[in-house]
Image: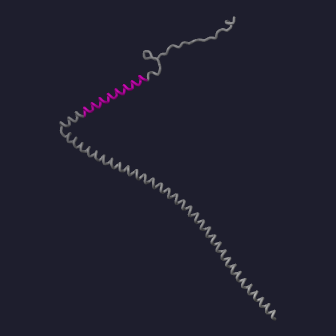
């Protein structure tokens, strides 16, 4: 019995050890499965994060291109604005100059109107205008004469392109026709 007891105790001890080892193995397998599931989950998250990173990089590149395009358009618009500001300031100066000229012309108009209200002043003005018209006609005639002389000078320089003229009509020297016949060789051999 003692041996039986030892054997039973040994068998119970072995069963208990196997039971504890089995429980530890089951717990270890559960932990391993849980760890494996966590690894799979983390790999999925890693792939998802990598995809998100790629997508974000693509969007960042597109945004960067859009920003560069917008900056170039903005610089172009700024250059245009600067040009238009310069043009605007020039136009404002021209406007001021024209307003000044208008004021001067209005003063001159008033002076002329007061001058034309008197008959003697009007007669003097008419005479002055007639003299100016006469001077203009003389200048125009002299200019036409000068231009005609210039044209005649060029026509004389150009000539008549090598044609012979006599009494205003073109003529050519008579052409002499030379008739060339071969010599009779039989006469020379005798």
Whether residue 149 appears in magenta in the rendering, the answer is yes
Is 174 placed left or right of 94 in the picture? right
Quadrant (top left/top right/bottom left/bottom right) for the N terminus: bottom right
Q: Where is residue 59 in the image (x, y as percent from the top left)?
A: 55, 62
Determine which quarter of the picture holds residue 61.
Answer: bottom right
Determine which quarter of the picture holds residue 147.
Answer: top left
Is 120 placed left or right of 43 in the picture? left
Quadrant (top left/top right/bottom left/bottom right) for the C terminus: top right
Q: Is residue 142 above or below residue 40?
A: above
State the residue in front, 4 or 35: 4
Is 178 placed left or right of 104 in the picture? right
Q: Is residue 140 above or below residue 96?
A: above
Toward the top, the furthest residue is 190
Looking at the image, which residue is at 67% across and 78% down? 31
Q: Where is residue 45 in the image (x, y as percent from the top left)?
A: 61, 70
Looking at the image, which residue is at 64% across and 9% down? 183
Toward the bottom, the furthest residue is 1
Q: Please give the range of residues in magenta.
A: 129-157
Whether residue 63 appears in magenta in the rendering, the answer is no
């Amino acid at each position: 019995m003692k041996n039986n007891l030892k054997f039973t105790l040994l068998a119970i001890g072995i069963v208990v050890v196997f039971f504890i080892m089995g429980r530890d193995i089951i717990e270890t397998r559960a932990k391993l499965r849980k760890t494996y599931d966590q690894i799979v989950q983390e790999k999925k998250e890693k792939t998802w994060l990598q995809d998100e990173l790629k997508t974000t990089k693509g969007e960042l590149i597109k945004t960067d291109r859009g920003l560069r395009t917008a900056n170039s358009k903005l610089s172009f618009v700024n250059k245009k604005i600067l040009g238009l500001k310069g043009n605007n300031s020039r136009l404002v100066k021209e406007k001021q100059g024209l307003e000044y000229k208008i004021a001067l012309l209005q003063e001159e108009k008033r002076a002329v109107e007061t001058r034309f209200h008197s008959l003697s002043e009007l007669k003097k003005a008419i005479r002055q205008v007639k003299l100016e018209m006469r001077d203009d006609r003389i200048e125009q005639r002299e200019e036409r004469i000068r231009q005609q002389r210039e044209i005649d000078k060029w026509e004389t320089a150009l000539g008549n392109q090598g044609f012979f003229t006599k009494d205003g009509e073109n003529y050519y020297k008579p052409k002499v026709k030379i008739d060339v016949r071969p010599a009779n060789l039989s006469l020379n051999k005798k």
